[in-house]
Amino acid sequence: MALLVLGVSVPAHALDLEATALIGSGVDTGKNPNNPYALQIGGAVELIVAGYVAGIRATRAVSSGDAPSKFDLRTFGGDLGWEWEIALLHIGPRLGLGRVSSLNEDFHEFYLEPGGVAEIEVGWFVAGADIRFRVVPKESDVNGLLAYAKIGLRL
């Protein structure tokens, strides 16, 4: 089956620019009394050249309950990856890396986010899902599994 999929897949267009809005949720894998990833909003911009992807993204996480300000998290970082195009479907792995911080900047650490993206492109419009696992090496309480819906434009 895998050979069949690779046989009908083609590299993505030579050059695309994509801008998407993100909304999602997640669960932390630490021992927090509240979920720091209850609601996530953000955006991403990606440049796709011959199937290779480079981009930037920013998110804000709103925690559940009365969590301390440490868990009102913001991220800003970059994405690297590649994608395959199968008819209208674009799929591929991503690796995000950047900085996660609290609203009042008393907490800021480096993060890694391995994951994957699946999107459907119709004309200039794109919609899909983005699944990540955030790893914060120096603060394991904010590690978590994140899922986003994404919608935007691809030119």
Image (cartoon, helix red, strand yellow):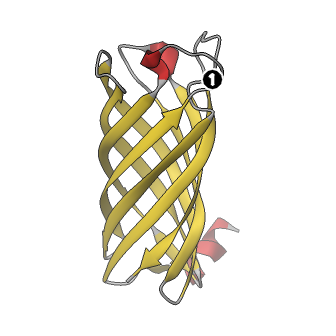
Q: Secondary structure at mark 1?
A: loop
Q: Residue type at mark 1? A: Asn
| 62 relative to 73 in the view: left or right | right
Quarter occupied by the N terminus = bottom right
Image location of residue 96, percent across then percent down: 37, 44
The residue under the point 35% across, 13% down is: 138
| 8 relative to 51 in the view: left or right | right
Q: Nearer the viewer, residue 21 or 81?
A: 21
Question: How dense is the environment of label 1, judged by Cα within 10 Å: few (below 14), some, or many (20 and up)?
Answer: many
Quarter occupied by the C terminus = bottom left
Image location of residue 99, percent across then percent down: 29, 32
Task: Name which quarter of the figure residue 102 lies in.
Answer: top left
Q: Nearer the viewer, residue 93 or 42?
A: 42
The residue under the point 43% across, 51% down is: 94
How many badges with numbers are in the image?
1
Image location of residue 65, percent across then percent down: 65, 20
Q: Using the image, determine if residue 122 lies above or below residue 71.
A: below
Report which residue position mark 1 lands on.
35
Task: Name which quarter of the figure residue 105 lies in.
Answer: top left
Image location of residue 133, percent across then percent down: 52, 35
| Residue at the bottom extreme of this rendering | 123
The residue under the point 45% across, 65% down is: 20
Q: Using the image, determine if residue 26 lies above or below residue 143.
A: below
Q: Nearer the viewer, residue 65 or 120?
A: 65
